[in-house]
Every structure is written in structure tokens, then in C-alpha cells.
Amino acid sequence: MNMNMKIQQNGGERSSTKIALTALSAMVAETTTFPIDLTKTRLQLHGESLLSTRSTNAFRVASEIVRSEQGLLGLYKGLSPAILRHLFYTPIRIVGYEHFRTLFATQHDGSLSLSAKALVGGLSGVIAQVVASPADLVKVRMQADGRTVSQGLRPRYSGPLDALNKIVCSEGIGGLWRGVFPNIQRACLVNMGELACYDHAKRFVIRNRISEDNIYAHTLASVMSGLSATALSCPADVVKTRMMNQAISKEEKIVYRNSCDCLVKTVKIEGLKALWKGFFPTWARLGPWQFVFWVSYEKFRQIAGLSSF
């Protein structure tokens, strides 16, 4: 009886340690790669209006941000809600994935196929995104606000708390979950590609003696997972970004009725390739983000005396 209580207590302590380490690693990774994420968001919003016909690219968007929005500080517009989001999102999906992986592995002779890992990754991503969606909404709105400022107009929000207050007042509590369905779709696809691919690729690299369980194995696995996650999630990411940027009020016209309407209008006005707008900045962010996160997380786990992911 006492032994079982000790095991449960140690398990709880390990879970709380993992939650703390994932949150810390995510904060480091998010701060490092946030300018790329901002560039990607602005690039995805470009072309929403028929007036926005001038072609653009990630470098031009980033240069415009630096030139017209408080210099380099403009590249960190919306960082605080982004970090707040990851305090919920990343621990839930990472620790949740490990928990589900262990649970399912015990029913399959201790090992899981890539498809089973993808299913587990998608499930953990969906749960995490539902919880973190309000913070994600505020992040997207504040990132898009910088474009309004560069046009000589007043920003919609002065900060994260002001954004939360105004969204609730004008759109109701449910407004905090605007775009939650395309958000869930994206989170499912991202985590299917990211977690399952990282897990599988790392074990492939180690099992085939390409590298030991070290920074080289983590780097190779993160690059492969970043590519698969980006290819799978980019269309849903474009729809999610546009849906979440759409503020609903009496003075403003509804552009997209739902995620399906957004998808159809985007393809109709801008072509099929618009669904992969921001692919390279997305991949350029996911690659470094995953590298910083996984290397930090694996190192922190080692310091804390936990086994490898």
C-alpha cells in the first residue's frame, strides 16, 4: 500500500517536472523564433482584400515591419500572448502525448507504429489547442494590429488584457474561441506531423546507429518533423489565421461565415497556392523552434534525471 502511494507520488512529481520543463523550453523557443512567426502571419493575411494585389514575400514583409513599426521591436508585436499560449498549449500536448503513448504502448507489446503515434499526436494536439485557443486568438489579433498601425490607423488593442476585454465585450465569451475549429484542425495536423515524426525519426536515427541519443539525433529528428508538420498544416494555418483575425461587430462586415467559406473564398480569389502562403517562413520557424525546444527539453530532462522523450 505504501509502495503504491510512493509510486503514484513519484509519478505525479515527474509529471509536474515535465510540465515545468516543457513550459520553460517553449518560452525559450518562442522568444527565439517569434519574428519569423509574425512575418508568417502577416504574409498569410496579405491578399485578403482585392485591393492587396501587389506581390510580396517574407523578406519584404519583415523589412516593412522593421521600417514602419518601431524598428526591431515591431518584430515582437504579440509576444506576451504567444508565451502565455505556450504555457498551456505545449505542456498539455507534450506531456499528454507521452501519457497516451505509454497507455497505448502497453496494449501493443510496448511499441507503436508511426500511424498510431500520429493518432496519439493529433489527439494530444486537439486537447491542448482547445485550452489555449483564447491566447492564440489574442496573439493573432495583436500581430495583425501592427499592419493597422503602419497604415496610420489606431491599433485595436493596447495589450493582451485590453484585447481579451474588448473581444469579450464585443463578441461575447464565445468570441475567445473564434476560429477554434480551423485551429483544432491545424493543431491536429501539426502534432501528427511534429510529435509522431520527431519520436519516430529520433528512434530511427538511434536504432540505425546514425547517431547516439544526443544533439545530432535531436537536430535531424526536428528538421524532419518540421517539414512534415508544415506540409500538413499550412492550409489549415492560413484559414485559422484569417478566421481569427476577423473581428465581428455591428460596424464591420463579415468576410468569412465559417472555415469552409474562408477556404473556398481564399482559393477562388487567390488560387490554390494561397493555401500554402507562408510555407517557407512557417518551416523556417518550425525548424529552429523545434531545434531550440527539443534540444532544451531533452537537456533539461537529463539534468532533472528524467529519461529521454
Image (spheres, grey):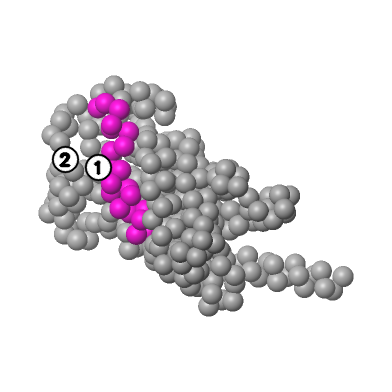
Tell me whether the residue at label 1 lies in contact with that at label 2, contact meaning CB atoms closer than 8 angstroms: yes
How many neighbours does mark 1 have within 10 angstroms: few (below 14), some (14-19), or many (20 or more)? many
Amino acid carrying label 1: it is Leu
Figure quadrant of the N terminus: bottom right
Please state the horizontal and vertical placement of residue 33, each as a whole percent of the image: 32, 59
Q: Is residue 143 above or below residue 269?
A: below
Q: Residue 56 bears which disc, if any? A: 2
Q: Is residue 53 above or below residue 127?
A: above
The residue identified by callout 1 is 43
Circle 1: element type: helix
Please state the horizontal and vertical placement of residue 39, each as a whole percent of the image: 25, 49
Of 72 and 228, the residue lying toward us: 228
Q: Main secondary structure of the magenta part?
A: helix
Of 276 and 107, the residue lying toward us: 107
Please state the horizontal and vertical placement of residue 9, each as a whole percent of the image: 73, 70
Quadrant of the rendered structure where residue 137 is? top left
Farthest-out residue, right: 1
Label 1 and label 2: CA atoms lie apart by: 8 Å
The residue depicted at 29 percent of the width and 21 percent of the height is 268
Q: Is residue 91 left or right of residue 72?
A: right
Amino acid carrying label 2: it is Thr
How many neighbours does mark 2 have within 10 angstroms: few (below 14), some (14-19), or many (20 or more)? few
